Image (spheres, rainbow, N blue to C red):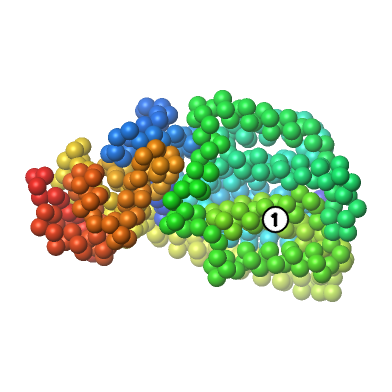
């Protein structure tokens, strides 16, 4: 690269750093709170199978994120919420820069790579929280690129990197471990199509891939998965969640919709249009990544991030191949005009990013509308937290746990279902009560509830407010706390 190209890369990376920092939300999300609480448990007691953050006895919970949880807890212990916010920013920046470098390596088009990175990272901004996904997605992006390098060069050192990344994934976010194998399947399929002599298609590029190192890596990582302290859970947890009751009400586990994901559908239609109406060919592996992650997204919204981050690289390559097929360029635009346009893009991104960053910095880490901050403090100061059996909402159970109060339920929905704990129907019981399908007294008697922390406007709150067996002990504009009178 000449000095001009290097300068453009440096400028774009610096702008991208500012942009990535600006899309990281300062407000914490559910998972962050129980992550801190679980991290403390891990460091004090190790990876235990019995759940200790809720007051239910005998619930088994195999921690699939022990390394991430203990890391976040440690950061919070020494650097507080600001440290966690900064940690997430660093990971977001790393992800954005790596994605940009990968796409630029593929397309050799600096501006195209820059713009496509901005778009992709913006679409994926929901995952930039202190959740294990922020590392697992980064691992998947790196794995995708390393697999491509292994296929291109046949250098076995890439195999070692892939095995090490798999081990890291098992300890950071084992519940998504099956996706590690999904990344290899398109290349295996491409090799099989080559053996079947289907490499003369007008639309498909079928390569003769050296499949031996890929098969070896798959076998090694499968065996390593069984050797981990979490047993077979890395292979089963994802499917238990998808097949359970959690999919009925958790947004990210529900199917993708047209009205809320226009860009997803638009990109898919664009890929199909390129393949139908142009002479552009697509690699079999790229086509399978786009199709596979698109189908996964149709079944669960959370998979759309696989589509954006992994299939997105394949989509960019397809668009780039189409542009090159028809020798499309912007040579018809005067060079001075190009420079002005480029400067305007840079300035616009910087201004918008800085504005969003400062708006974010003015926010609090804890949203007091979504989480019962004052109500929780009242409980700590006025209630016997060691003996209370509190009923709480799914959305803020993790905050109670973060503050040292054992909850009824939290957003780790799976462990409260029969798929993870035989005979356990805690999540189903909770849903039936808060949605008015079942009388709250049935549940409260079943679990011997002593207190209830609720939203003011919940159906159950309106009923308990008129129940002579319950006493209102706390109320603010959003939350209420009731105490069972007979337990006094």
Q: Where does label 1 land, which residue?
A: 290
The image shows residue 398 at horizontal and vertical percentages of: 35, 46
Identify which residue is drawn at 32% across, 56% down: 432
Tell me if residue 337 can be seen.
yes
Instruction: Give the camera-side residue of 463 and 63.
Output: 463
- Say if 191 sits above or below 366 in the image: above
Q: Is residue 463 left or right of residue 88?
A: left
Q: Nearer the viewer, residue 321 or 213?
A: 213
436 is higher (above) or lower (below) than 59: below
Identified at 58% across, 50% down, the residue is: 93
- Give how far across and how far down residue 347 sits, in percent: 62, 67
Q: Is residue 305 visible?
A: no
Question: Dot 1, crowdedness within 10 Å: few (<14), some or many (≥20)?
Answer: many
Q: Quadrant of the C terminus?
A: top left
Q: Position of residue 274 (x, y in %)?
A: 78, 66
Q: Secondary structure at mark 1?
A: helix
Using the rendered view, name the quadrant where residue 415 is placed: top left
Q: Residue at x 49, y 43 (%)?
A: 240
Q: Residue at x 16, y 61 (%)?
A: 465
How many marks overall?
Answer: 1
In the image, taking residue 301 as reference, residue 391 lies left or right, namely left
How far from the left and from the top, in percent, is residue 30? 40, 50
């Amino acid at each position: 690269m000449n000095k001009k190209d290097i300068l453009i890369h440096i400028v774009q990376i610096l702008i991208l750093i500012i942009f990535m920092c600006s899309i990281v939300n300062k407000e914490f999300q559910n998972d962050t709170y129980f992550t801190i609480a679980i991290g403390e448990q891990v460091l004090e007691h190790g990876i235990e199978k019995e759940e200790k953050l809720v007051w239910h006895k005998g619930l088994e919970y195999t921690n699939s994120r022990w390394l991430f949880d203990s890391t976040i807890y440690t950061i919070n212990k020494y650097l507080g919420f600001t440290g966690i916010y900064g940690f997430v920013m660093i990971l977001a920046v790393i992800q954005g820069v790596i994605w940009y470098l990968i796409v630029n390596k593929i397309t050799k088009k600096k501006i195209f790579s820059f713009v496509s990175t901005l778009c992709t990272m913006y679409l994926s901004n929901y995952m930039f929280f202190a959740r294990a996904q922020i590392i697992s997605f980064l691992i998947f992006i790196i794995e995708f690129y390393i697999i491509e390098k292994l296929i291109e060069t046949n250098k076995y050192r890439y195999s070692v990197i892939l095995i090490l990344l798999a081990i890291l994934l098992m300890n950071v976010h084992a519940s998504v471990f099956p996706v590690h194998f999904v990344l290899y399947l398109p290349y295996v399929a491409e090799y099989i199509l080559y053996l079947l002599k289907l490499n003369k298609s007008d639309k498909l590029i079928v390569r003769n891939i050296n499949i031996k190192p890929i098969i070896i890596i798959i076998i090694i990582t499968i065996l390593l998965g069984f050797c981990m302290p979490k047993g077979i859970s890395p292979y089963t947890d994802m499917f238990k969640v998808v097949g359970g009751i959690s999919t009925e009400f958790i947004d990210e586990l529900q199917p993708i919709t047209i009205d809320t994901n226009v860009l997803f559908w638009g990109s898919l239609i664009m890929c199909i249009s390129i393949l139908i109406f142009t002479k552009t060919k697509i690699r079999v592996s790229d086509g399978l990544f786009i199709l596979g992650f698109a189908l996964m997204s149709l079944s669960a919204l959370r998979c759309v991030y696989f589509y954006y981050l992994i299939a997105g690289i394949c989509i960019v390559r397809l668009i780039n191949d189409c542009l090159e097929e028809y020798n499309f360029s912007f040579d018809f635009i005067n060079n001075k005009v190009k420079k002005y346009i480029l400067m305007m893009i840079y300035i616009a991104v910087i201004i918008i990013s800085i504005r969003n960053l400062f708006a974010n910095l003015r926010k609090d880490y804890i949203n007091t509308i979504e989480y019962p901050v004052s109500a929780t403090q009242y409980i700590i100061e006025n209630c016997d937290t060691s003996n209370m059996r509190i009923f709480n909402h799914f959305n803020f159970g993790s905050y109670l746990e973060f503050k040292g109060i054992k909850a009824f339920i939290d957003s780790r929905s799976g462990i409260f279902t029969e798929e993870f704990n035989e005979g356990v129907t805690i999540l189903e019981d909770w849903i039936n009560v808060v949605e008015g399908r079942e009388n709250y007294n049935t549940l409260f008697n079943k679990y011997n509830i002593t207190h209830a922390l609720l939203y003011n406007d919940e159906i159950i709150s309106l009923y308990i407010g008129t129940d002579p067996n319950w006493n209102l002990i706390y109320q603010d504009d959003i939350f209420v706390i009731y105490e069972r009178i007979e337990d006094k």
